Image (spheres, rainbow, N blue to C red):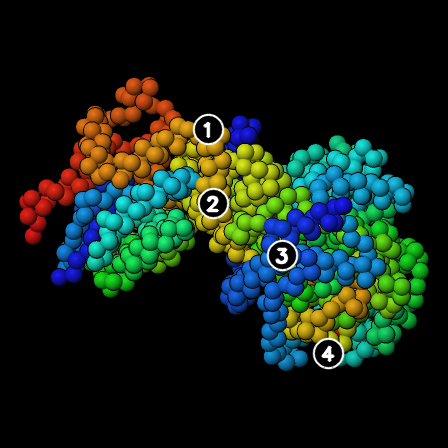
Amino acid sequence: MPRVSLFVTCIIDQLFPQVGLAMCAVLERLGYQVDFPEAQTCCGQPAFNTGYREEAGGVARHFLEVFRDAEYVVIPSGSCTAMIRRHYAELFAREPRWREETERLLPRIREFSTFLLEVARVADVGARFEGVVTFHDSCHGLRELGIKEGPRRLLAQVRGLTLREMEPAEECCGFGGTFAVKFPEISGGMAQTKIEAIRRTGAEAVVGIDSSCLLHLRGVLSRAGLGIQTLHLAEVLAHQ
Amino acid sequence: MPRETVLHKVRTALGRSVGQAPAAAPEARLRIPAVDLEARLSSFLRRIEELAGKTHRAATPEEARAYVEGVVAGRPAVASRAGFLRECGITALPSVRTGFTSAAELRAACVAADFGITSADYALADTGTLVLLSSPEEARMISLLPPAHLAVLPRDRILTGLDELFTRLPRPAEQTSSMVLVTGPSRTADIEQILVRGVHGPGEIHVIVV
Amino acid sequence: MRGAYQEQIVATLGNRGLQSAIYKASGRLMDHRRHAIDPAELPDFEELRAQANLIKQHTIENLDYYLEQFEAQVTARGGQLIWARDGEEVAEFVADLARRKQARLIVKSKSMTTEEIDLRKRLAPHGLETVETDLGEYIVQLAEERPYHIVAPALHKTREEVGEIFSRRLGVPRENEPEKLTKIARAVLREKFLAAGIGMTGANFLVADSGAVVLVENEGNARLSTTAPGIHVAVAGIEKLIPRAQDLAVFLKLLGRSATGQALTVYTSFLSGPRRAEEIDGPEEFYVVLLDNGRSKLLADRDQRQSLYCIRCGACLSHCPVYRKIGGHSYPWVYSGPIGAVITPQIQGLSEAGWLPFASSLCGACGEVCPVKIELPRLLLELRSEIQRARSRQGENRWEKLAFRLWAWVMRHPRVYEMLGMAAAAAMPGEESGNWLERLPGWLNRGPLKAWTSQRDLPPLPERSFRRLWRERVKAGRS
């Protein structure tokens, strides 16, 4: 049986463990043997984005060591995947050894929805979810990894699910990592625009591939008293 | 000295020395599509109409003159000294003044005129653009000061687009001090993004192709 | 520093009318652009972007050569090239020229470069009247404000506000319709055009092989400024150069579409030198002022100098979700939006506007739409890193740096990470107990946590992390 290693990301590990379990369930349903290297922690993105490259580098090296021998690494986050796929090269610009490590690992790293479509080559994972949802295009996934159609193809196969696109779909939710706490008013303002768009669709839930966006949107939705749920794509696909 | 200081700073930053030849430039990219005259003509006219310009296809120079006469309707007009306008008999129309060689007189006439009439050196089919080169025959102000501009040109001057223009005219500076591409009437959306025509240049334009 | 702008940001966010105006106007510009670059309209858009990037990269990397070629050509065509290290030298030249030619009125068409050096203010003490002739710029000039957006300077003004400004400053009867307001401006400015001694413009492009200045506009004021007065002065940054007239076939297809969604703007002027002897009209004298003002400093950094490729289309502003919330006046310099966030610290120094590159969620929309493919998100990230290094040297980010050091240490020690996670989860009052944040002692609820909760709720930490659940699963022997 083919093996995949989960990199659940620190935010899912600590705040949304059910997403990790959901991803696990889907992969096992498809016949994969799933493992979880316990030494994993973070990809280093928070430090990198805040301008602390040295600190980020240490964490990134740890990541590479943990997953060095993985057959496949599956990540339920567009931004973490993009960090590794796009920014590790910048981080290790002057460290050829770690650049090489990154190069060696890259072909085996995939964001979750991409893994399902490109490696597992399935769009129908046997899911059922009754309800109307809308989809949020997380920026890093969208612009750095080209993730747009993929999740929609997967959702189209979910029995009982109706997808209503929000307008605008591609505008940033306002999380942006430490931006959310360094510029809270702007971050909140951007989220207000987003939840307005979500509300207009009449959807019961907003689905996304990035838990950081969902954490932020969930917080704003709940503060606004709107009963709209936030769900990771994995949770929808695991649903039966 | 500012010149030496700036150049020195630039060279030092780039790691280049005085008189050093540049690296090879990327080749100029000019792709001229194959579009026949009739297709160019109809694209040209359609684009102008999309921009709220008026167009007229004249079968003959006389027809062009008649159209212009109809639009001008005896009101003050200034025409350039373009040979083509003379051929069409437009410069001979009653209220049309032409033949100016003094900038001051020309300006005064343009300020008083309701119409400015010019030909065009080239036209661009894909954008509905007139290409006007300043010359002894074509002064700049005629297509600029009066509130309406009429341009009369023969159809064979219509090129496919910018690529063809810059292929024919790789160094416009050798020909003229001013080459202006005119695409539709003057406009602005500076107030509440509402479109208004005729800000400083002509708000009305007629293009007649013979 | 950030303080002054924080107020402006909060004020703009709180002003519904203004918010709506900025959002709608930028939204429209985005839509127009999208239609104009549709493959049916422009099939080779991506190819053109790549080519434009290559041309700009080549020009910047060989800038000294092209500057000299440009100078030789301008001179050969009867014009004069002036070199200016900074705004003061530009003002000195213009004031001196005006004095020699006894010109007291200058008509000016839109130029971000002249805004950058506050040229109007510098010229005022010399007894020179400088009138902005682009309608949007004219409005903000009368209102004594800075332009709000690169291509829509008066984006933030309603028609009533414009009507009020006109009637107050021009003494004309109060009008509220855009059409009527435009007619008023046309009449007032026409007199200025015809009376002015000097016409001043910027330059969208400087063409090295022709000694030419290229001006792109919709109203006709740049044409009038360069036709009616006897003297034309173009002020442009040294980075505006492109090698050949033929390269305009690439750039002109990108500029209008990216800025306003137009295949070509109404007027594109290609001007080289004063009028030729046999031509009938046009300026008798032609000057191009090349401005450095800190640009040469950037050239040394291979990555950072990409910002010099900018053709000032404004697309990055219109697409930036941050700009769309806080508007042009929330930025400390005349250049706003993502390009402003990059060049302000680059040119004015890292300490001046060090907060700017952090005022971004790094969504990447700017880089996606830039017609010359400047890697704006990457430049923002690099600037953040440089700024933290600079702050570190000044001892300014001690606590934050320490926090990230600790964080990184924890992240390299999985068992410590796990223990901390468990400790935090155990300290949680439990999911059923309502708003757990309200129960936090005041001393904990500050800094980042307070910033977070000022805008949104935070779920309590689940009792068991994924890794704990995973272990339980394994123990239970999953099927």
Real-space CA distance between mark 2 and mark 3, rounded to the nearest whole angstrom = 25 Å
Amino acid found under the numbered disc labelled 1: Gly
Dot placed on the residue nearer the N-terminal end, 1 or 2:
2
Mark 4 or 3: in front is 3
**Which of the two discs, 1 and 4, sits closer to the camera?**
1
Residue B93 location, quadrant:
bottom right
Residue identified by numbered label 2: C382
Residue drawn at (7%, 52%), measured in percent from left and top? C479
Q: Residue at x 69, y 51 (%)?
A: B7
> Circle 3 is placed at which residue position?
B16
Marks 1 and 2 share the same chain:
yes
C422 on left or right of B171? left
The spot of residue A82 in percent (x, y) is: 36, 51
Would residue C221 be seen by someone viewing this image from the given angle? Answer: no
Q: Please give the chain letter of the residue carrying mark 3.
A: B
* Residue A219 seen by the camera: yes
Q: Secondary structure at mark 2?
A: helix
Kindly check if marks 1 and 4 are in contact, taking CB atoms under 8 A apart as contact.
no
Mark 3 closeness class: few <14, some 14–19, many ≥20 residues within 10 Å: some
Residue that numbered label 4 is attached to:
B156
Measure the alpha-carbon separation of dots 3 and 1: 37 Å
Q: Looking at the rendered structure, which numbered label has been put on residue C3?
A: none
Q: Nearer the viewer, mark 2 or mark 3?
A: 3
Question: Label 1 to label 4, Cα distance in Å?
Answer: 71 Å
Whether C436 is drawn above or below A52: the answer is: above
Kind of residue at disc 3: Arg
Q: Residues within 10 Å of mark 4 (few under 14, many from 20)?
A: some
Labelled disc at residue C395: 1
Return the residue nearer the eye: C288 or B144: C288
Q: Amino acid at mark 2?
A: Glu
